[in-house]
Image (cartoon, rainbow, N blue to C red):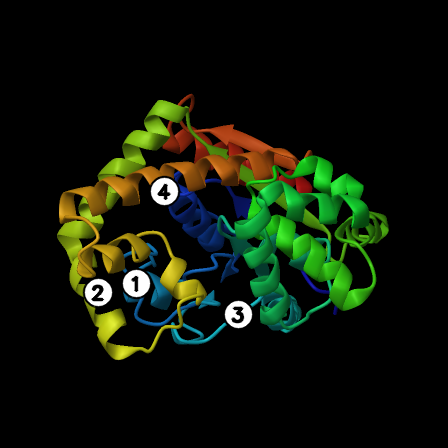
Amino acid sequence: MANKYDKVVAVVGPTAAGKTELSLKIAEEFDAEIISADSMQIYKDMDIGTAKVSEEIQNRVKHHQIDIITPEEDYSVADYQEDVDPIIDNVFQKNKLPLLVGGTGLYIKAVLEGFSLPDMDPDEDLREKLRKEAKEHGNKYVHDKLKNIDPKLADKLHPNDLRRVIRGIEIYKLTGHTKTYYKKKQKEAPPRHQAVKIGLTRDRKELYDRINKRVDLMIEKGLIEEAKAILNNYELKDNSTARQAIGYKELFNYFNGEYDLKEAVRLIKRNTRRYAKRQLSFFKRDDSIKWYNLSKINKEKLFKEVLNYLKNNL
């Protein structure tokens, strides 16, 4: 018997836009299983700051890729792709709909279109050497090195975006090919899964207000205690992803006495707003996403329109 579905649905958009509620509606209407595409919800014990859905909701609708590793562990885009492929196959086999939900654009892109960068361990010695050179001779000196290797990438990156500049050099040194070469290869490859993509957004002022309120609510719910527990229970490396997570990073610095709590909260709000802006610009590059603006349409109308759109396109 043929599978009921042969397409993956993705619900994408910036943080605090309203993806969770819509995805639950879709899941219940189409008998879907939700696959989280959030690079921070993979971590155990980081619940409040990553806005994980409650256990009650997870019992109602099957969720994947939540709480799969500890904050001490590293996890790459390639790992995500490798983990999610069999989940999608399994959901199809059960005659259910795989529903990717989240704001980590690279995760979604890797699963649906492919991730062409080879999985490679970072070359810490090379990174350290280049950081030293930038300190001694200025960022432009390192940027010029990238220009000689990968002029197209260098044109896109500001010399002060040192992390990405160094990464561009590192990719070439470790693989013999430039990042631009891998990007071109990725573009030419056929999609890995047929997909229907729904994008949620809001007018900037409303989105930013929602983010600010959400941070206040996280603090009320116990984010400070949660961050303290993470720091006490796990040995986080300085460069670990979990240590860099918005909402935790700022509180860790507050615990270290770098600034007071009021400043920590201000920075969490600011950094989350900036992150939302980056998420939007990432997703807006994808012409295949069907966008809905929740500042212009109420929830009931949104649910109706999205469910209709999916019925016609699945």
Residue 135 pos. (x, y %)? 52, 51
143 or 219, nearer to the observer: 143
The image quarter containing residue 207 is top left
Q: How many marks?
A: 4
Marks 2 and 4, Cα distance to the nearest angstrom? 18 Å
- Mark 3 — residue? 75
Label 2 Cα crowd, 10 Å radius (few <14 / some 14-19 / many 20+): some
- Mark 2 — residue? 226
Question: Disc 3 or 2, which lies upstream in sequence?
Answer: 3
Question: Disc 3 or 1, which lies upstream in sequence?
Answer: 1
Marks 4 and 3, Cα distance to the nearest angstrom? 21 Å
Question: Disc 4 or 3, which lies upstream in sequence?
Answer: 3
Q: Element type at marker 3? A: loop
- Mark 1 — residue? 47
Residue type beneath disc 1: Asp
Marks 3 and 2, Cα distance to the nearest angstrom? 21 Å
Residue visible at 52% across and 32% down in the picture = 305
Residue visible at 54% across and 37% down in the picture = 199
Q: Quadrant of the N terminus?
A: bottom right
Q: Which tag is nearer the camera, tag 2 or tag 1?
A: 2
